[in-house]
Image (cartoon, rainbow, N blue to C red):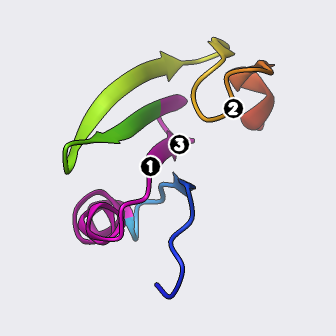
Amino acid sequence: ITIAPDWVCEVLSPSTRTYDLTEKRDVYREQSVAWLWFVDPAARTLEAFALKEDAWVLIAALHDDAEVRVAPFDAVGFALGALWQD
């Protein structure tokens, strides 16, 4: 990563799930990405993390149709269910 973003959102898939949750997560920490979200369409979940003192801290664990108001986009909410294809 040349210039690290402030926020990354990974959409998990069966083929890349382990890689995203381990190796890529470590790269984002090493590059000081401030916020990291994992969206899992199969489980209908969103887990959001903030980087604090070089460690990921879970700041939200949402599922189904929960209202999403999570940093860095906590000023505007949306329904998590809008992401799921029914």
- Report the residue at 61% width, 35% height from top: 72
Q: Nearer the viewer, mark 1 or mark 3?
A: 1
Disc 2 marks a residue whose amino acid type is: Phe
* Segment colored magenta: 17-46
Q: Is residue 12 left or right of residue 28?
A: right
User: In this rendering, is residue 50 above or below 9?
Assistant: above
Disc 3 packing (10 Å; few <14; some 14–19; many ≥20): many
Nearer the N terminus, badge 1 or badge 3? Answer: 1
State whether residue 20 is above or below residue 84.
below
Question: What's the CA distance linking mark 1 and mark 3?
Answer: 17 Å
Q: Which residue is mark 2?
A: 73
Which residue is under mark 1?
Answer: 34
Amino acid at dot 3: Val
Across and down, in percent, residue 29 comes to 29, 60
Name which residue lies at 50% across and 42% down.
40
- 3D distance between C-alphas at marks 2 and 1: 12 Å
Query: Does residue 67 appear anywhere in the picture?
Result: yes
Residue 86 visible in the shown view: no
